[in-house]
Image: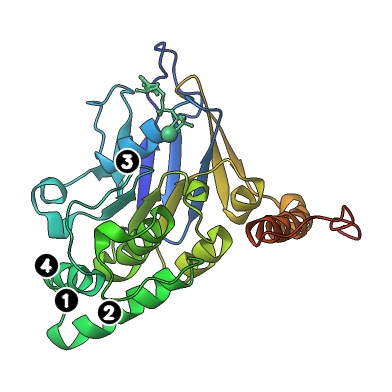
Amino acid sequence: MIRDITVMGGHGRLGRPDLVRKIQFNMGDVISIVGPTGSGKTTLINDIELFANGNTPSGRQVLFNGVPAPIEYRDDPSRNPIALITQHTTFLSDMPVDAFLTTHAKVRGGNPEDITRLAQEAIDFANELTGEPLAAESRMTELSGGQTRALLIADAAIICSTPIVLLDEVENAGIHRTRAIELLRRYRKIFVFVTHDPRIALLSDARIVMKGGRIMDFIVTDEHERAFSIKVARLDDALASLRDQLRNGLRLCGTELEGVR
Ligand SMILES: Nc1ncnc2c1ncn2[C@@H]1O[C@H](COP(=O)(O)OP(=O)(O)OP(=O)(O)O)[C@@H](O)[C@H]1O
Ligand SMILES: [Mg+2]
């Protein structure tokens, strides 16, 4: 049973040390990673996924309940506590969605009478995140980028039910980002995700700031930022509605943002 994970600082691209030497995530925490392009966000996520133990380019160490990852995390895929959803995911299998989900549930040791229910729950979860719903019988290779990521997030949360979920750049996939975090918060897990989006960053409990491959800061979202996030959300909703109008082929009249405070 994982209670917490700890990242022990290593160094950045040029060998200079991470400024934050120790970061602990507890079960239920939602943490974002921010920083310019090329600053080492994916590298940090990969360190966690690889159970880094001083053996990755960053020299970082990741501890599970205070100790390095037990050997079975690596050796037994059904014991691996981490689901990583990368930016460039393509399916190699042409299975229908429901066959993929039920097969995966079986491999993860799901109870036979639960398997169909779990697969349906995962499809429903995915469909809350996409504009165009996916069907149980859709072929995996025919899903859009957004549908693929939505399915993988649902699979990680419901089928694998891993205690740790890592998401690299959720916003580019065209899925409903705030909804994803709301839904994921219902399952008590550690969520770590890369984001460039202020609304998403402010939904997290804290954020890790990267630069030059180094961990520069760890900022806990305070009351002041939480209050401000309501205004950010209103602005973001207004922009989202502009996007929808464009998608639907409408002409903008220029007064759409009036009254947004
Ligand atoms: N701590 C580190 N030690 C050595 N190399 C690093 C380190 N951090 C990042 N790098 C290298 O720097 C490059 C950019 O890092 P990375 O891909 O993690 O950045 P990113 O923040 O995810 O960028 P993007 O926003 O474009 O996805 C990679 O080639 C990576 O291997
Ligand atoms: Mg990256």
Secondary structure found at label 4: helix
Q: Is residue 187 visible?
A: no
First in sequence, mark 2 or 1: give its number: 1
For the N terminus, give its image quadrant: bottom left
In front: label 3 or label 2: 2
Badge 2 crowding class, 10 Å Cα cut-off, few under 14, some 14 to 19, many 20 or more, is: some
Amino acid at the residue labelled 3: Ile
Give the percent coordinates (x, y) of residue 199.
65, 52
Give the percent coordinates (x, y) of residue 69.
21, 44
Secondary structure found at label 3: helix
What residue sits right under mark 1 in the picture? 110
Residue 126 to residue 80: above or below: below
In front: label 3 or label 4: 4
Give the percent coordinates (x, y) of residue 14.
41, 11
What residue sits right under mark 4 in the picture? 107
Q: Name the residue at 31% across, 47% down.
A: 89
Relative side of 119 to 18, left or right: left
Asked if marks 3 and 1 touch (Cβ < 8 Å), the reply is: no
What residue sits right under mark 2 in the picture? 118
Badge 3 crowding class, 10 Å Cα cut-off, few under 14, some 14 to 19, many 20 or more, is: many
What residue sits right under mark 3 in the picture? 48
First in sequence, mark 3 or 4: give its number: 3
Question: 224 or 117: nearer the eye?
Answer: 117
Q: Name the residue at 74% across, 53% down.
A: 232
